[in-house]
């Protein structure tokens, strides 16, 4: 999601931005390059809220252009970083962006939907999702799927540059219509995570930018 662009302006902008939901073709490639840069400050802020151990097995869902896979791969030694995305173009871009780490077996990227992930139960220490939950088709069911693949006490981390606040959603109206997206409040995130087998919920806000990130642990 890239809300720095006024989606009301022209049809070309809209054709590009619509690719944030599922990047396709050349415009998909372009938006992935752009998101690797435009999401960087938010991602740096977000990841400052949890620890990574060098032997962690980490999954990034909706990995897009692959910048967060690179970030995590730099922090592990014996661990592993896996990215999934349901867009073929995102998978290609993430592999290209992390060529060496992929060749070394440190990073793996798989085309898959969050709703049905090709992993055994209790596989990951950390599961992350940056700017992607807006588009998950069945949020509660999909959180249950995340819970399934996390190890006990494993950490879920979700980070968004848009947060639902009563009476303040007009600024997102164009994006919501264009992208058919769900922008969640902290309360809904907490309730949803509690309902799907997580505890120890924490929410962090960056009010200057309207960013939110949350963490919780698998019970
Ligand atoms: C706005 S982009 C964010 C990409 C990246 N995480 C970032 O922060 O730059 C959303 C990504 O989530 C992926 N995505 C959306 N719904 C998904 C789903 N149901 N399963 C897997 N990936 C999904 C899209 O294909 C896209 O690459």
Image (cartoon, helix red, strand yellow):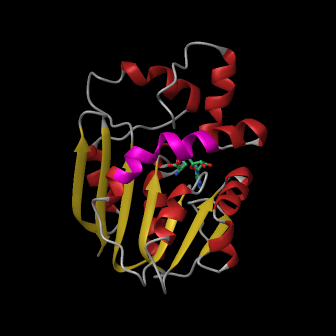
Query: Which of the image's four quarters has the C terminus?
Result: bottom left
- The chief SS type of the magenta part is helix
- Side (left or right) of 188 relative to 56: left
Is 34 magenta? The answer is yes
Nearer-the-camera pick, 95 or 7: 95
Residue 8, x across and y down, in percent: 55, 14
Looking at the image, the residue that sits furthest to the top is: 9
Q: Is residue 174 above or below residue 144?
A: above
- Side (left or right) of 82 relative to 19: left
- Side (left or right) of 143 relative to 115: left
Number of numbered labels in the structure image:
0
Residue 124, x across and y down, in percent: 46, 78
Is 204 magenta? The answer is no
Residue interval drawn in magenta:
33-44
Q: Is residue 74 above or below residue 212?
A: below
Q: Is residue 164 above or below residue 45?
A: above
Residue 153, x across and y down, in percent: 31, 78
Q: Residue at x 23, y 52 (%)?
A: 203
Q: Residue at x 50, y 20 (%)?
A: 174
- Side (left or right) of 145 relative to 154: right
Asked if residue 125 shows in the view, the reply is: yes
User: Picture quarter containing residue 119?
Assistant: bottom right
Nearer-the-camera pick, 114 or 8: 8
Asked if residue 21 shows in the view, the reply is: no
User: Picture quarter containing residue 52?
Assistant: bottom left
Q: Is residue 59 above or below residue 131?
A: below
Nearer-the-camera pick, 126 or 31: 31
Q: Residue at x 39, y 39 (%)?
A: 161
Q: Residue at x 65, y 44 (%)?
A: 22
């Amino acid at each position: 999601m890239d809300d720095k662009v006024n989606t009301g302006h022209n049809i070309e902008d809209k054709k590009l931005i619509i690719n944030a939901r599922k990047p396709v073709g050349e415009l998909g490639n372009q938006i992935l390059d752009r998101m690797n840069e435009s999401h960087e400050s938010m991602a740096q802020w977000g990841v400052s809220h949890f620890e990574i151990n060098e032997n962690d097995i980490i999954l990034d869902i909706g990995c897009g252009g692959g910048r967060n896979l690179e970030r995590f791969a730099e922090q592990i030694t014996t661990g592993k970083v896996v990215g999934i995305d349901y867009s073929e173009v995102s998978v290609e871009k993430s592999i290209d962006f992390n060529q060496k780490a992929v060749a070394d077996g440190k990073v793996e990227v798989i085309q898959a939907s969050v709703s049905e992930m090709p992993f055994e139960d209790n596989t990951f220490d950390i599961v992350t999702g940056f700017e992607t939950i807006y588009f998950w088709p069945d949020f509660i069911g999909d959180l249950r799927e995340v819970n399934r693949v996390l190890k006990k006490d494993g950490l879920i981390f979700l980070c968004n540059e848009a947060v639902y606040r009563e009476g303040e959603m007009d600024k997102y109206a164009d994006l919501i219509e264009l992208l058919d997206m769900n922008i969640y409040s902290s309360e809904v995130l907490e309730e949803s995570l509690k309902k799907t087998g997580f505890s120890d919920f924490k929410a962090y806000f960056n009010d200057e930018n309207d960013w939110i990130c949350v963490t919780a642990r698998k019970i």
